[in-house]
Image (cartoon, rainbow, N blue to C red):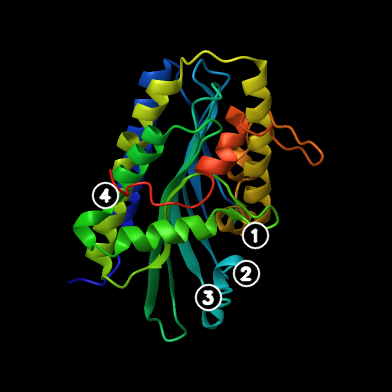
Amino acid sequence: MSSTPSPSAVKDFLLDLQNRIVQALEELDGTPFLRDEWQRPEGGGGISRLVEDAPVLERGGCNFSHVTGAALPPSAAAARPELGGRAWEAMGVSLVLHPRNPYAPTVHMNVRFFSTTTADGTPVWWFGGGMDLTPYYGFEEDARHFHRVCHDALAPYGADLHPRFKRWCDDYFHLKHRKEARGVGGIFFDDFNAAGFEQSFAMVRSVGDAFVEAYLPILARRKDTPYGERERDFQAYRRGRYVEFNLVFDRGTLFGLQSGGRTEAILMSMPPIVKWRYDWHPEPGSPEAALYTDFLPHRDWLAGA
């Protein structure tokens, strides 16, 4: 089993993955995505693909980046102080989609590869990524479908991966200051390299390739559901939680900003319309309250399915 990393193979996959996801979204929404190539003065660059004010996606972006640097940023070196100050290379595809319809959930996905060397020149590398679903009005069939596809993407690579990555997602996408989950979860992993490069890369390809199957059927099912101002208002309120997580806790956002990445691409994940209210609570028994009681608490969505 090879443990020698191949950044060129990872880059080829990521560029193809970005193209395939954007093509699928363009077909569903009927709107072409903007293409914006950019260069980073410190090394590397990327391709941002973005759509705004489309019929289905109020805002959506699917970004590829491949960046290099002379010294590891604090967000990446925190867990590996021995690598602090080392030259590094990072690449990935990251997407966030904010549909217009409040009954269609927001979704996030990313897959990424990071490599550097120790002081004696030994390669150090790892993969990270995952995907998670953030509904405003929850549907059990949507949550079960999303988690089932995530489970099936990981199943060929070890029965332990899905429960571990599902729990990791629940723990990571948790707003500590609110004591609540961001959404219904999915899978999340980081620092993944124990299986060797070939097997680890195969697992990451499976996760990336599963995104369209995991999310687009949900979006197609919910995008035309009738809604009113009440639902849009609640959607904007809950989007505020998304902003809070990304700006306070998200390691990818922190890494991008600390490494001198392109701000427009890093903050692409922000929803276009957001609201905050002081100490607001949904009316008990309302559809809005059901999000808090039935969907945000961590649970095994595949149990009994």
**Where is mark 1, residue-wise?**
258
Which mark sits nearer the N-terminus, 3 or 2? 2
Mark 3 vs mark 2: give the one in front: 2
The label number, if any, that marks residue 74 in the structure image:
2
CA separation in Å, label 1 and label 2: 7 Å
Q: Tell me which amino acid carries mark 4.
A: Ala
Q: Which mark is residue 153?
A: 4
Outermost residue toward the front? Answer: 285
Give the amino acid at mark 1: Gln
* Tag 3 residue: 86
Mark positioned earlier in the residue sequence (2 or 4): 2
Q: What is the spatial separation of the Cα atoms under label 3 and label 1, in whole angstroms?
A: 15 Å
Numbered marks: total: 4
Describe residue 139's horizontal placement relative to residue 79 as left or right: left
Marks 4 and 1, the one that precedes in the sequence: 4
In percent of width and height, residue 122 lies at 37, 81
Report how far apart the C-alphas of labels 2 and 4 lie in the structure: 32 Å
Separation (CA) of disc 4 from disc 1: 32 Å
For this rendering, which residue is in front, 113 or 171? 171
In terms of image quadrants, where is residue 196? bottom left
Could you give the CA–CA distance between mark 3 and mark 4, rounded to whole angstroms?
A: 34 Å
Front one among 241 and 108:
241
| Label pair 1/2, CB-CB below 8 angstroms | yes
Q: Which comes before the other along the chain, label 3 or label 4?
A: 3
Q: Residue at x 79, y 36 (%)?
A: 277
Nearer to the camera, 264 or 148: 148
Q: Residue at x 82, y 39 (%)?
A: 278
Residue type, numbered disc 2: Pro
